[in-house]
Image (cartoon, rainbow, N blue to C red):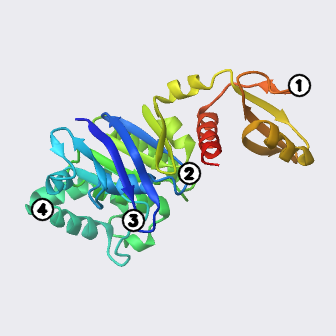
Amino acid sequence: MELQIKNLSKTYGNGVKAINDISLDIPVGMFGLLGPNGAGKSSLMRTIATLQEPDSGSITLGDLDVLKQKEEVRRILGYLPQEFGVYPKVDAETLLDHLAVLKGITNNKERKELVKSLLTKTNLYRFRKRNVGGYSGGMKQRFGIAQALLSNPKLIIVDEPTAGLDPAERNRFLNLLSEIGENTVVILSTHIVEDVRELCTNMAIINQGQLLSTGTPEEAIASVGGKIWKKQVKKEELEEMKEHFQVISERRLAGKPSIHVYSDGQPAEGFELVNADLEDVYFSEISRDQKVLA
């Protein structure tokens, strides 16, 4: 089952064009949707999740027309939004059982077995009697995945799922997502490049509502191979470097800025060619897009 998005656009009442003629084919597996905050990722996710209407375009999931067959899509959709609300004074087992009823799972025996299975799968079973309000951030995210899996979904959407998680919780959560993605279309919407690099077989980068690139992480990295240059510069030289070269990123090393520059050839004396990674791809795409917009 493949998710196909064709020429999708959405402009809000305040004039913001959140989705600008985006077309994507998303197969089974983990698909990373990368972009900075405000890029349009959440708007695209909400549209796919049938929570808002686009102005134009189409979305199909297998044989289903997502924009016209909303109820059918919701039965096979698992959605973990960026802000996942819970009833803080209800224990996890009771809350997940309640959500299962709302999903239409009315057989008591079947529902109890499903709840136990999902709490075990998300490593929450021993905490099942604890109120969800007392869960850590990572535990709440894993509970969010448990509720997203209630209907044995064919499509799962997770929006910025690892923001604010400590490294251990992040690893647990990403391992769980990776396991789910073996047989399901899973869209991971994030601005964290590392999450996509570690998990996703396919990806896209968007900014200002526009699709900048799509492909595998390996293809993306190959596209900037031999074009990323590094140099450590003085702080007072930084602005001049930005004026003369396409500086895509900067970081501090021993108090001095170390810059990465996108260039077909050596930008100037002292620049060293580096092995590009997905972060370089991301920053170069965003940098070029901002130049075009300027």
Q: Residue 84 shows which numbered tag?
A: 3
Give the residue pinned by disc 2: 36
Q: Are marks 2 and 1 in contact (CB under 8 Å)?
A: no
Secondary structure beneath dot 2 equals loop
Q: Are marks 2 and 4 in contact (CB under 8 Å)?
A: no
x 63%, y 40%: residue? 283
Residue 266 appears in the rendering: yes
Give the residue pinned by disc 4: 104
- Compared across the picture, whether 106 is left or right of 122 comes to left
> Can you say whether 147 is above or below 8 in the image?
below
Q: Amino acid at mark 2?
A: Pro
Secondary structure beneath dot 3 equals loop
Residue 124 appears in the rendering: no
The percent coordinates of residue 170 (x first, y second) are: 51, 50
x 15%, y 66%: residue? 101
Q: Whole-Å distance between the Cαs marked 2 and 4? A: 37 Å
| Label 2 environment density (alpha carbons within 10 Å; few <14, some 14–19, many ≥20) | some
| Label 4 environment density (alpha carbons within 10 Å; few <14, some 14–19, many ≥20) | few
Q: For this rendering, which residue is in front, 282 or 85?
A: 282
Q: Does label 2 or label 3 sit earlier along the sequence?
A: 2
Secondary structure beneath dot 1 equals loop
Give the residue pinned by disc 1: 269
> Can you say whether 107 is above or below 275 in the image?
below
Q: Does label 2 or label 4 sit earlier along the sequence?
A: 2
| Residue 84, quarter of the rendered image | bottom left
Residue furthest to the left in view is 107
Q: Whole-Å distance between the Cαs marked 1 and 3? A: 51 Å
x 37%, y 44%: residue? 187
Give the total of numbered labels. Answer: 4
Q: Amino acid at mark 4?
A: Gly
Q: Whole-Å distance between the Cαs marked 3 and 4? A: 21 Å
Q: Residue 21 shows which numbered tag?
A: none
